[in-house]
Image: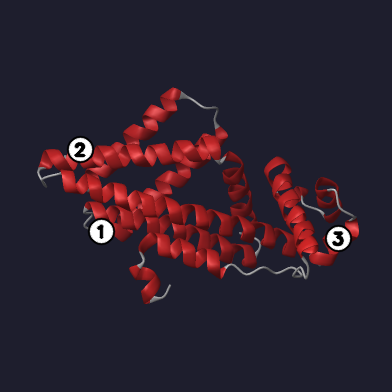
Amino acid sequence: MTPATAQQGAAGVANAVAESVQYQGRKASRQGSEQRRQQILDAAMRIVVRDGVRGVRHRAVAAEAGVPLSATTYYFKDIEDLLTDSFAQYVERSAAYMAKLWANTEGVLRHLLAQGDCSALSRARLADEVARMTADYVSRQLLNRRDFLLAEQAFRQEALLCPRLAELVRAHEQILLHGARQMLEVVGSRQPQQDALVLTAIIEQMEYQGLLDAPDAQADEQMLAILTRYLHLVLAAV
């Protein structure tokens, strides 16, 4: 990350990640061929969500995309290229989404800070509000972006065996980490980097548990309680 990117904050990091994504497969030369290449990548992602990474095969992807088998082998010489580009596209789209989210979140946090008076009670209320915002973020991810989270989990597992995927996973992790760090820095964390590492680990575990279990109001309450306790500790509000 360059100094200029750092100054732009979490949204800048997310945009930088989106711009840095490199695709491995053959580039499309015409608009029509780009549309076909996109069909193949989208089909591969649907298979990852439905059947896991091991379900991605040239023949299965061609059938899912409704294109000739020769089209998948033309753009992607092997399955590793196809998987890497599928996740690269996911990272690019996720980064663009998160850049907007972090930009909006910082504005909300600064507005909340302006309303406070730095008292213990004010910081406690701020911790409650940040916990609620974080819990809402996880809930929205599970409700509206469930397929994306399922694909992310599958690719993270595959990255243990594939160095190219591992590089993309690390880049993707920076988006959430820098966003959490910026949020905690804005609200007054004394150790924003360390606190962000813990918070992102909590969020990722909650997302995984949410994918594993059926939606449950009691689980949502427990999630909010955990986040509230953690953020009160971080902000020394209790």
SS assignment at label 3: helix
Residue 185 lies, in percent from the top left, at 27, 57
Residue 85 lies, in percent from the top left, at 68, 62
SS assignment at label 2: helix
Considering only vertical position in the picture, is 29 above or below 231? below
Residue kind at label 1, given as amino acid type: Gln
Q: Residue at x 57, y 59 (%)?
A: 92
Q: Earlier in the sequence, mark 1 or mark 3?
A: 3
* Disc 2 crowd, CA 10 A, few/some/many (<14, 14-19, 20+): some
Q: Residue at x 52, y 59 (%)?
A: 172
Residue kind at label 3, given as amino acid type: Ala
Residue 116 visible to the viewer: yes
Residue 227 lies, in percent from the top left, at 33, 39
Considering only vertical position in the picture, is 168 above or below 234? below
In this figure, which residue is indicated by the disc labeled 3?
71
Do callouts 2 and 1 mark residues in contact (Cβ within 8 Å)? no
Q: Earlier in the sequence, mark 2 or mark 3?
A: 3
Considering only vertical position in the picture, is 89 above or below 46? below
State the mark number for residue 125: 2
Q: Residue furthest top?
A: 217
